[in-house]
Amino acid sequence: MKVLITDGISPEGAKILADAGFDVCQKALSPQDLITQIADYDCILVRSATKVTKEVIDAGKNLRVIARGGVGVDNIDVKHAEDKNIMVLNTPGASAISVAELTIAHMLTVSRFLHLSSMEMRQGKWPKKEYGKGIELYKKTLGIIGLGNIGKEVARRALGMGMHVLAFDPPFAPMDFIVEITTREKLLATSDFITLHVPLDKQHGPTIGKAELDMMKKGVVIVNCARGGVVNQAALLEALESGKVAAAALDVFEHEPPTDAEKALINHPRVSVSPHIGGSTVEAQERVGAEIAIKVVKALGANR
C-alpha cells in the first residue's frame, strides 16, 4: 500500500504509517503534478494546502482513502470521492484545544489593544493613555455559533473567565457543562463577543453578513477562527468603519494568502489577525498526525 503525504505530518504519524508496513512518500506537488502522479497511490493524506479536486480523484485510479489532518474537508471534493467509493477521513477534534486557545487569545488582544501597543512600543512610543481604556472579558456575554468540538472548548475557557456564554447550534448535543442554548436572533442581538466555529456553507454563503451585523448590538466584537468566507469581509469592514463593530479578530480569510483587496481589513487598526494558525501548535500537530495515521492504517488495513 502506498501513501502520499503532500502537506506534511508529525514524525509520530509518519512512524505509525511506516510501522504498519505502508510505503510512505512525503512531497509537495503542484496541482498538475498531483494529477499526474496520484495514480500510483492508494491513499493521499493532506492538510489545508492541497486541493483534492474532482480531477485529482478521477486520476487516482488506485485511491481508496483520502485523509485530511484537520477539522474541515472543504479542500476535498467529498461527494465525488464518495460517489467513487473512496473513503474520506479527517480529525475533527485533534486541534480543538489549540483553536479554542487562539480564539480566546484574539479576544484578549482586541480587548486590551495588544496588537497596536506592541507595535508602537517597538517604535519607541509609550502609548499608556491611548490604550488605557480596554475592557475585561469578565461578565461579558460571549455568543458561540457552532458548538462542536472547538466551540465547546471555547465555551469551557470562557466560562472559566467568568463570561456568560450563549450558544446557537441546531444539531446541538448535550455537554458536561452548562451554557445557555438560545436562538440565533437572541445571540446576535445580545452578545458582546461573537465567535464562529462552523464550516463554510458553500450553498448559502456567509453565516454572518450585512443582515446579521445589523442585528447585533453596537460595539460587538467578531472573531473568526473557523473558515474564510464564514464572515462576509466586505460587510465586516463596513461595520468596522461605521462603528457598529468595535473590533474583529481573524485567523482565516476568503483568500489565503489574502489578496491586495483584503489589505484594508487586515490593516484596520481595530482588527487582530493571524495567518490561519488555529491548529498550528506542537501539541495539536502531534495529535493530528497520530490520529489521522491510525485512521489511515485502520481504513487501508480493512481494504487489503
Image (cartoon, grey):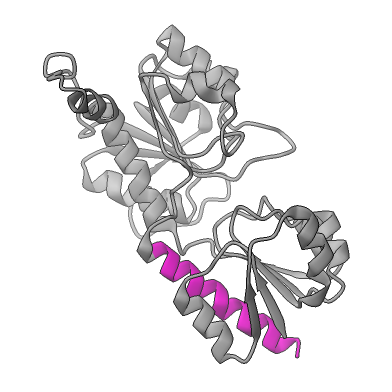
**Left or right for 160, reference 175:** left
Place of residue 303 in the rendered image (x, y in percent of width and height, measured from the top left): 75, 86
Q: Residue furthest top?
A: 242
Residue lying at 68% horizontally and 77% vertically, measured from the top left: 3
Q: Is residue 285 left or right of residue 198?
A: left
Asked if residue 20 shows in the view, the reply is yes
| Residue 268 shown left or right of residue 213 in the figure | left
Residue appearing at x 63%, y 80% in the figure: 24
**Is 290 colored magenta in this rendering?**
yes
Q: Nearer the viewer, residue 170 or 34?
A: 34
For the N terminus, give its image quadrant: bottom right
Residue 208 in the image: above or below residue 176:
above
Range of the magenta residues? 284-304
Query: Residue 227 placed where, x, y %?
Result: 56, 42
What residue is at 46 percent from the left and 56 percent from the top?
149
Is residue 251 positioned above or below 2 on the image? above
Q: Is residue 210 left or right of residue 289?
A: right
Residue at image coords 58%, 24% = 260
From where the camera sits, is residue 179 visible?
Answer: no
